Amino acid sequence: MNPLIKRIIFIVVVLGLWELGSQLQIWSELILPAPSSVGVALYEGFANMTLVYDFVASFRRLIIGLAIALFIGTSIGLLIAKSKTADDTIGSMLLAFQSVPSIVWLPLAMMWFGLNDKAVIFVVVLGGTFVMAMNVRSGIKNVSPDFIRAARTMGAKGFDLFIRVIFPASIPYFVTGSRLAWAFAWRALIAGELLSTGPGLGYTLSYASDFGEMELVIGVMIIIGVIGLIVDQVIFQRIEKSVAKRWGLEL
Amino acid sequence: MTFITLDSIQKQFFDKNNQPHTVLDNINVSIEKGEFVSILGPSGCGKSTLLSMVAGLTQATDGEIVIDNDYIVNGPGKDRGMVFQQASLFPWLNVLENVKFPLKKEMSKQKASDQAKKYIQKVQLSSYLDHYTHELSGGMQQRVAIARALAMNPEILLMDEPFGALDEQTRTLLHDQLEQIWIDTKKTVLFVTHSINESIKLSDRILVMGTQPGRILTDIKVDLPRPRTNYKEQMLRIEDEIMQYLKSEIDKVVQEELNNESTH
Ligand SMILES: Nc1ncnc2c1ncn2[C@@H]1O[C@H](COP(=O)(O)OP(=O)(O)OP(=O)(O)O)[C@@H](O)[C@H]1O
Ligand SMILES: [Mg+2]
């Protein structure tokens, strides 16, 4: 059977059992609302535009944060790939930073920037920067020496060599770095919003929870999951695949 | 007139214990303009290293390489095009862009395109201009690499086992193409190979190398008209002669490996 069909049947069965359990009142609406109530909450949220505003606000922070993260990450990555001293110092710190979930920076960020957008964006930036930097570093370091030798026999050197050979040769790593940066930034964004002010998907999630609107809580969770899935699978994995194919890295 | 002079070339590498290893020892060669010279020898004797020194990618430990009695090689130059042992086309560029790579800075886009296309035609790949590396066979890739090396119109073409990874039929086809290109363009060619046949078929001269340390055992002139398909007998005689030289070298390599086995 087609895996897509299997998947659809599976989801329908899970939703069916869930709805059935709710209708039979095996568990209370307050603990786990029925899929139909979640559907209604989502519909209402979109109809009165609150979820749309949340979505727009969240994406605005994400885009700003991610853009800054990619820029700083690329700069650090280039620096530590090219300078041994930078690699020995900054480079060794990166792994340590990367292993700390960026949300732990939020209390500090709120002290620095106040309880506002900037604090959340700061956390998003930290979420994406390090993984981008490490991928850019690997990309530059792993450029095949054969490419560089070939380019040198054709007169390329210095900056020209970098722009025309080293950079394009490491594009697959830039793409992977961006995909991972996005994934970390997305998680950091929602975590930051949960603890911060609105509007935003994370904020609405915590707000709905405070008022016991479990159907909206689940509705927002679904939105968050679906967006994550779409951006990862539809956008990034496609780009990654076509780049890997072109660059001859397909396994 | 001498065009490329290798003067007492010596090359050492240092191993991980910082012990020097002499890879090439006292190489003296003079190559005439327009000559097709093969460098033939067992694996590991230093053929790639020698070629890479002429290309200016590797520095000799001692001795110098002089081009056209004019300048000493101390880096790569556009007078020397190189085709590598392993595929070295840029996968992010298509065939035309790859061949245009060395031309980008020197001329207008239009002129670069025209010149690139001219050389792509010489290797008969005109219908593959917009194909990417992963869409080409190994033989096609090496032909593009040859076109790319020729595109900057170098005086000297350095080729490091360009057909080593190809099947016999493709190889034969490319031999004919290369011979034609050489006749048309009158380049000076330094062609590394470990195929005796290939070297006899293509070259004016064959430098037979020995190993440990790498050195030139003999310099054999192949004075047969081209194409050489009708000179099987003479070619066989040259093959025998080369085998005499190489046999003792191959024995030496085998002996060395056996010794290494027993000491480990
Ligand atoms: N960068 C390097 N550092 C240390 N040793 C090297 C280096 N490059 C080559 N060598 C050594 O020099 C010797 C000659 O290598 P080279 O690649 O020139 O051989 P080759 O004749 O081209 O062999 P093949 O026919 O297998 O390509 C080998 O023993 C190799 O291990
Ligand atoms: Mg070699």
Image (cartoon, helix red, strand yellow):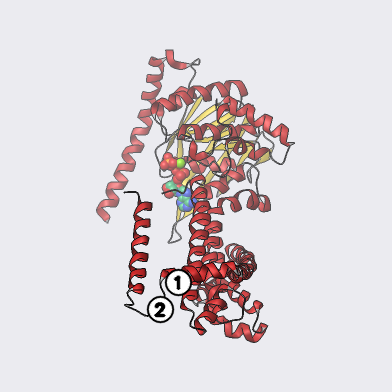
Chain containing mark 2:
A
Judged left or right of residue B2, residue A176 is left
Q: Which structural element holds mark 2?
A: loop
Q: Residue at x 27, y 55 (%)?
A: B263
Residues marked 2 and 1 touching at CB (< 8 Å): yes
Give the percent coordinates (x, y) of residue A205. 52, 77
Chain containing mark 1:
A
Give the percent coordinates (x, y) of residue B121. 59, 25
Above or below, comparing residue A120 to residue B24 in the picture: below
| Disc 1 crowd, CA 10 A, few/some/many (<14, 14-19, 20+) | some
Give the percent coordinates (x, y) of residue B253. 34, 42
Which residue is identified by label 2? A29
Judged left or right of residue A167, residue B247 is left
Looking at the rendered structure, whether the residues under marks 2 and 1 are on a common chain is answered as yes
Spatial CA distance of label 2 from label 1 is: 9 Å
| Furthest residue toward left | B262
Between residue B29 and residue B84, name the one nearer to us.
B84
Q: Which structural element holds mark 1?
A: helix
First along the sequence among labels 2 and 1: 2
Q: Amino acid at mark 1?
A: Ser
Above or below, comparing residue B9 to residue A108 in the picture: above
Judged left or right of residue A28, residue B264 is left
Q: Is residue A49 visible?
A: yes
Q: Amino acid at mark 2?
A: Glu
Above or below, comparing residue A171 to residue A126 in the picture: above
Between residue B70 and residue B112, name the one nearer to us.
B112
Numbered-mark total: 2
Q: Is residue B214 visible?
A: no
Between residue A25 and residue B69, name the one nearer to us.
A25
Which residue is identified by label 1? A37
Q: Residue at x 44, y 27 (%)?
A: B171
